[in-house]
Amino acid sequence: MIFLAWNCRGTGQASTVDVLRDLIHINKPSIVFLSERKARSNGIETLRRSMGYQHGIFVKAIGQSGGLCLWWKDVLEVQIIFSSANVIDTCVQDFVSGSVIRLTWIYGPPPRAEYKGTFWEKCTRSFTADGLPWMCAGDFNELVWPHEKREGREWEVGRRRFLKEFMQRKELIDLGFSGPPFTWERDWEDWGLIEERLDRAMVNNI
């Protein structure tokens, strides 16, 4: 089973659709998670079918942020356990291998969101592997270690690290990465180019 998770920041541009099409063609994922902004359900459904995925779920954006969708092929049976503006939680069976796994797809709240602590506390209380192999993946909008940030404000030593707490309490292991070490960047007038690693995938040890 191959997964693709991408914060594509909108699929309105032809260049973004071309990149997505290339990623799917090269990697041939059986399940795709997209977090993006201001997506319309009819446009996403048309795009899903054009990419060759028979099934999907779409969660509308709230205001200027969010908008999630999950696509999957007929080789999978996907049970939607829970969905919200920030999460699509699923149990997935692969008909080819017969394996069953828990997959939780996350688009984390912005760094300064007032409900950030409440969100992560709810994740810790609600999400459990139920004895299954479990993967959490997506754009978490959270840093875990100082080396995951370049430039900008200095690392705040006393700041609470919600994702790190979540990983420790749920005994999740970061799968690491290949390629560039940062997944997000922005050029600020006051700070220059800031780069951070906000996207990742984590698994339990089952």
Image (cartoon, rainbow, N blue to C red):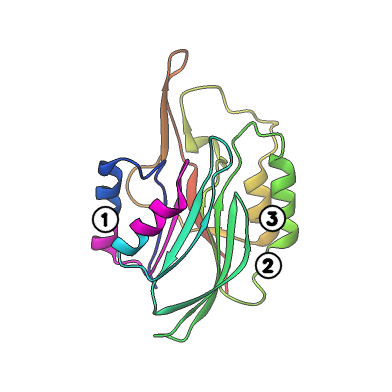
Q: Is label 3 or label 1 in front? A: 1
- Asked which quadrant contains residue 50, the reply is bottom left
Amino acid under disc 2: Thr
- Amino acid type, residue under disc 1 in the picture: Arg
How far from the left and from the top, in percent, is residue 82? 64, 63
**Which of disc 2 and disc 1 is earlier in sequence?**
1
Relative depth, front residue between 189 and 176: 189
Horizontal and vertical percent position of residue 14: 26, 43
Give how far apart the Cα atoms at labels 3 and 1 are: 32 Å
Say which element carries label 2. Answer: loop
Q: Which residue is mark 2?
A: 128
Which of the numbered marks, if any, corresponds to residue 1?
none
Q: Quadrant of the C terminus?
A: bottom right
Decide whether residue 115 is among the magenta residues.
no
Q: Earlier in the sequence, mark 3 or mark 1?
A: 1
- Residue named by callout 3: 123
- Residue ID at (68%, 49%): 165
Res 31 seen here = yes
Residue 107 in the figure: left or right of residue 128: left
**Residue span colored magenta:** 23-47
Location of residue 187 (image quadrant) = top left
Tell me if 178 is positioned left or right of 133 in this view. Answer: left
Picture disc at residue 21: 1
